[in-house]
Amino acid sequence: MLIVDDNADAALVLSVCLSAYGHETAVAYSGPEGVQLAHSFEPDIVFLDLGMPRVSGYEVAVALRKIPRLARVYIAALTGWNDPKTREQVVSAGFNRHLTKPAKVEVMLELVEKAVA
């Protein structure tokens, strides 16, 4: 799975947590880096922060959906934003799920199991 978040601490904690449960992870700290890494890593699931500088998570989701072999990747927004407009934009950008930070580990593991099954 790919974690894309400009908050390095948050991204690394999530990576370590998911790795502890046996999942292979890759981490990117910007939108462009996330898209680039997705090309080579080809994740089953992407946890994507929305509020990143220069290239937002919305833009990354749209870019990932345009890559033929990644068009069906499961993309979960992982953000502190939880207002109706954000949720609407998440759907419009092609995300599969909206999670609010801090997301419970149990919820994320359940989501991972369903997404990769």
Image (cartoon, rainbow, N blue to C red):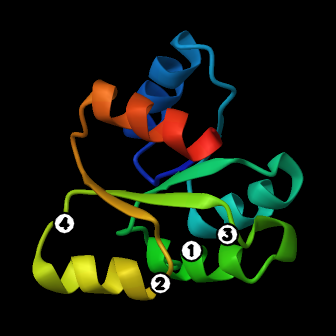
Q: Distance between the residues labelled 1 and 3?
A: 11 Å
Residue drawn 52% across the image and 33% down it: 113
Residue drawn 20% across the image and 57% down it: 80
Please indicate, yes or no, whether residue 1 appears anywhere in the rendered image: no
Residue annotated with mark 2:
93
Q: Do the residues labelled 2 and 3 touch (CB within 8 Å)?
A: no
Marks counted in the figure total 4
Residue annotated with mark 4:
81
In the rendered image, the vertical position of residue 45 relative to residue 93, given as above or below: above
* Residue type marked 2: Ala
Image-quadrant location for residue 70: bottom right
**Mark positioned earlier in the residue sequence (2 or 4):** 4
Residues 32 and 89: in front is 89
In the rendered image, the vertical position of residue 88 relative to residue 112, given as above or below: below
> Disc 2 vs disc 4: which is toward the camera?
2
**Mark positioned earlier in the residue sequence (2 or 3):** 3
**Mark positioned earlier in the residue sequence (4 or 3):** 3
Q: Estimate how packed mark 4 is, as few (under 14), some (14 to 19) or many (20 or more) residues with alpha carbons within 10 Å.
A: some
Image-quadrant location for residue 26: top right
In the rendered image, the vertical position of residue 57 relative to residue 109, given as above or below: below
* Residue type marked 4: Trp
Residue annotated with mark 3:
32
Q: Do the residues labelled 4 and 3 touch (CB within 8 Å)?
A: no
Q: How far apart are marks 2 and 1 (CA)?
A: 6 Å
Q: How far apart are marks 2 and 3 (CA)?
A: 16 Å
Residue annotated with mark 1:
61
